[in-house]
Amino acid sequence: MRRNVSDRAFETAFLFKCAVAAIVVVTFGASEAAAKVAGIQLAPHRAVYDMKLSDTEQQSGIAGLSGRMVYEFSGNACEGYSVNFRFVTEFRDLSGGSQVTDLQTTSFEGPDAESYQFLSKTYVDQKLVESSRGLARTETGLKAVELKEPDEKSLQIGQDVQFPTEHLMNIVKIAQDGGHFTASDIYDGAETGDKVFGTTAVIGAKAVGIVPEIDGERQDALDAVASWPVTVAYFDPSTQENSGEQTPVYQLSFRLFENGVSDKLVLDYGDFKIAGTMTALELRDLTDKSDCE
């Protein structure tokens, strides 16, 4: 059944937020994961991406799409990591209608994934349609979540469920070690804040010297940084079929650099695809606090 542009606009903003904020996960427990990624340094940076419709089928109901995404990452292993994210998109349907979505999120992840604090707001045509806010903490044998929005409630998720930056550091570690496949569950407070998403990831061959070009200029700061093509499939456990099989909600492909920068984004939502091209990159000074003294 064809969905209207409002449904698609909202869903795509939410899904792309998930994909960027929680790039991938692996199957380590929290404390084990922290130990295994010791020494990995993610680069504080600000990246801007132009988003456009790259492929569509008629049943999607989408005639055109354009937008911009801004992703800011800062922090270090001792003080924790902050992410500010904004994704503004205009959707156009087959009848000529249009709609603008504006997704804004901020989050802070404590050292060793000890905690995760988040605030996410989604606007459609400047009207607030969804908001989530909460705090998750790693405790013995589990992770506990205290939600403040959209409703106040407490819930528990498994100890192996990972937070976004923890996920990112682990995929880098797996790629460095020559791994090519991994799977696990993620939590980033998306949607109503009470969902855990499953993922599977395929990591391609390592490369050096494949860097973005912005306005015709190579980003030489990434020239010596290793990178890998990565494809991640995201699953909603609540939609599992009777056979036990699951169909991905969407798949995200991108080139992941060893320092955490991503380029060449492609979101495949089944009946349409969105491509993201980096148009600006600011690599900021890295404070070396790997020894946490």
Image (tube, grey):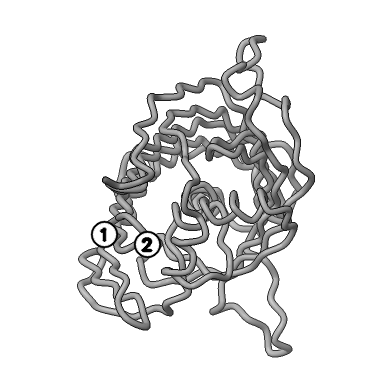
In this view, the residue in front, 180 or 248, is: 180
Residues packed near mark 1 inside 10 Å, few (<14), some (14 to 19) or many (20 plus): many
Q: Quadrant of residue 147?
A: bottom left
Q: Secondary structure at mark 1?
A: strand
- Image height check: is 159 above or below 208? below
**Does any portion of residue 63 appear in the rendered image?**
no
Q: Looking at the figure, which quarter contains the C terminus?
A: top left
Asked if marks 2 and 1 touch (Cβ < 8 Å), the reply is: yes
Query: Circle 2 — which element?
Result: loop
Q: Is residue 142 above or below residue 258?
A: below
Question: Residue, x 72% and y 62% (percent of image)?
Answer: 181
Name the residue at the top extreme. Answer: 216
Dividing the picture into quarters, in which one does residue 198 lie? bottom right
- Mark 2 highlights which residue? 189
Which sits in the foreground, 121 or 139? 139
x and y percent of residue 239 in the render?
59, 78
Left or right of 202? Residue 10 is: left
